[in-house]
Image (cartoon, rainbow, N blue to C red):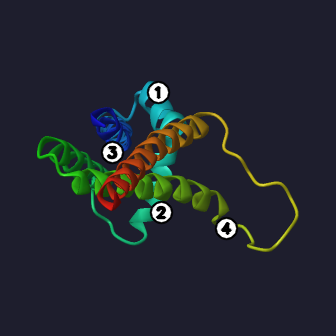
Amino acid sequence: MHGLTRLQLIGPLVLFATVAAADVAAYELANAPASAWLWFLNHEVFSIFRKSRAVFAGYVNLPFVHVFVASLLAALAVAGLMLRKNLLLAISSNLSLVCAGFLVYSSFYWKSLGQVQAASTIAVHVPTGSDAYFVALLAAGSLVSFAASHYVYFRLLRQRAE
């Protein structure tokens, strides 16, 4: 059971690591705007995070809000593991899936801005390149964490029922 408890850490920690890397690249780009490598990182590799920052800035313009939320979820997960509180760990795991979903949704929302919204039978756009890698990374980490937290709670419910 302890292995499944640790699996719940994957989602919040993957979310924190990817968001922190994206914000560090954006911060360094502000310090060294002539760096072609940092421009490539910001616009190609971490484009999903740049798009979500732009979408989120339309509602609340707080600097480093993604890092704050991701670090809060990671701290909540680690505290739940250290204090042996399954509920804290499960909440962090489930909210990391929600945050990963928001990042993916905002990337798709960004692509639909300025386009006419209508029903059609055309193919759905599937992200390619770096967006697809981060979508897969965030989805896989968050879904593993989400599934592990639900399995642990269903097992606890079954043990209490017996």
Q: Is residue 132 above or below residue 52?
A: above
Q: Is residue 114 left or right of residue 33?
A: right
Q: Which mark is residue 114?
A: 4
Asked if residue 70 shows in the view, the reply is yes
Which residue is the extreme one toward the right? Answer: 121
Q: Secondary structure at mark 4?
A: loop
Q: Earlier in the sequence, mark 4 or mark 1?
A: 1
Q: Is residue 22 left or right of residue 40?
A: left
Residue position marked by numbered label 1 in the rendering? 36
- Report how far apart the C-alphas of labels 4 and 3 lie in the structure: 33 Å
Q: What amino acid type is highlighted by mark number 3?
A: Pro
State which mark lies toward you, 2 or 4: 2
The residue nearer to you, when weighing 39 against 121, is: 121
Residue position marked by numbered label 3 in the rendering? 12
Image x and y of residue 7, in percent: 36, 37
Whether label 2 touches label 4, CB < 8 Å: no
- Report how far apart the C-alphas of labels 4 and 1 lie in the structure: 29 Å
Q: What amino acid type is highlighted by mark number 1?
A: Ala
Q: Around disc 2, counting alpha carbons within 10 Å, would you say few (fewer than 14), some (14 to 19), or many (20 or more)? A: some
Q: Is residue 102 above or below residue 42?
A: below
State which mark lies toward you, 3 or 1: 3
Q: Earlier in the sequence, mark 2 or mark 4?
A: 2
Q: Secondary structure at mark 2?
A: helix
Q: Earlier in the sequence, mark 1 or mark 2?
A: 1
State which mark lies toward you, 4 or 1: 4
Q: Which mark is residue 28?
A: none
